[in-house]
Image (tube, rainbow, N blue to C red):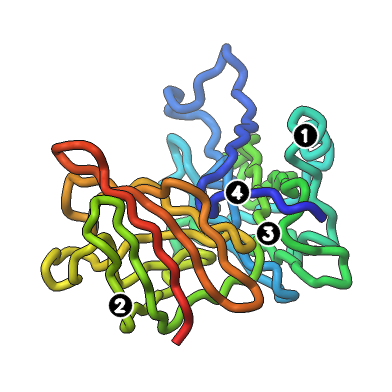
Amino acid sequence: MKAIKYLIFILSVVILSSCLDQTTNWDDNATGFNFAGFESTTSALNFVSDGSEYIFTFRMKLTGPTSKEVKNPITVTVGVDQDAMDAIAAADPTKIAAVAGENYRLDQTEIVLDPNNNFLNLFPVTVLTASNAGITDPLDKTPVLVLKVTQVTGDASVTNHGKSNVVSLNYGCDSNLDGSYTVDISINNGAGIRHRTDEYITKTGVGQYRTTYVGHWLPASLGGVPGFTFYDVCGNLTIPEQNLVDIYVNLVFGSSTGSADPVTGVLKMSYEITFDNPPNNTYDCVYTRN
């Protein structure tokens, strides 16, 4: 499948919600219904497509004007809203309806909100990335799973609040760029090249990394959080706008999309740092594994 670039943790949000009858405001009605369901109406899951199964959980709770008077455990039944998934896919060419057994699996469809746990619980969904299910990374379209509450039992005062949880499944390439490097940093202001043999890149999240060096300074001279953050999406390296070592007003941002050579392991990135007196400094970096 063709590669599409996306920045992990920057998400496309689709909001799907339903409203109560406009003639009835349950929140203002001291004797109205209480509601059981998902706490969030949108979610985005980021994971590596490495053949593993990932279990994600979604918070469910009980709310309402008389929820503190409810004494019985509440059983909530959860299902998949296929019609809503098809509608999202039809409206957005970058989305596709998630497929059971290929993209996800529901190992349970019921969950209990217990008064001994403040009527809170987590509903699990298993995300599948097995290659034999046709999953390759990244996908041409983002699978979307819509979870909805289909039934609520246990107390006559509790009903389904009618709000679904629209879940985007973001499949990412396996990324392993952390480790020890030698970096050559070319500076456009005539300051020459900085040659650092003790650069270490640390993995801080799914496809997310932090370097040791930034600009032409030594880490100890700047303080703050050493280096800069960058992301790897299937060999495309991007540096989001960020404050210099997280404490200065100077901004660090990528001037172009970098690359990770899958054969040699060499990383190439270019970024700029802003200063009070323009122009900005540009840094072209080549990282070679030690």
Say left or right for 220 vs 64: left
Task: Tell me the CA gap for discs 2 and 4.
Answer: 30 Å
Task: Tell me the CA gap for discs 3 and 4.
Answer: 10 Å
Q: As drawn, which residue projects farthest toward the top? A: 23
Question: Badge 4 local density, few (<14 within 10 Å), some, or many (20+)?
Answer: some
Percent across and percent down for residue 287 are 44, 72
Task: Tell me the CA gap for discs 1 and 2.
Answer: 45 Å
Give the residue type at disc 1: Pro
Task: Tell me the CA gap for discs 3 and 1.
Answer: 17 Å
The residue drawn where x is 48% and y is 82% is 289
4 or 1: tag closer to the N-terminus: 4
Q: Residue under label 2, please give it.
A: 196
Give the residue type at disc 4: Tyr
2 or 4: tag closer to the N-terminus: 4
The residue drawn where x is 45% and y is 59% is 269
Residues at circles 2 and 4 in contact by the CB criterion of under 8 Å: no
Is residue 122 something one can see in this rendering?
no
Q: Vertical placement of 198 versus 131: above or below?
A: below
Q: Residue under label 1, please give it.
A: 93
Considering the image in quadrants, where does the C terminus appear?
bottom left
Say left or right for 79 vs 189: right
Disc 1 element: loop
* Residue 252: assigned label: none
Q: Residue under label 4, please give it.
A: 6
Considering the image in quadrants, where does the N terminus appear?
bottom right
Q: As drawn, which residue projects farthest toward the left? A: 221
Query: Between 274 and 174, which is closer to the camera in this rendering?
Result: 274
Disc 2 element: strand
Give the residue type at disc 3: Tyr
Disc 3 element: strand
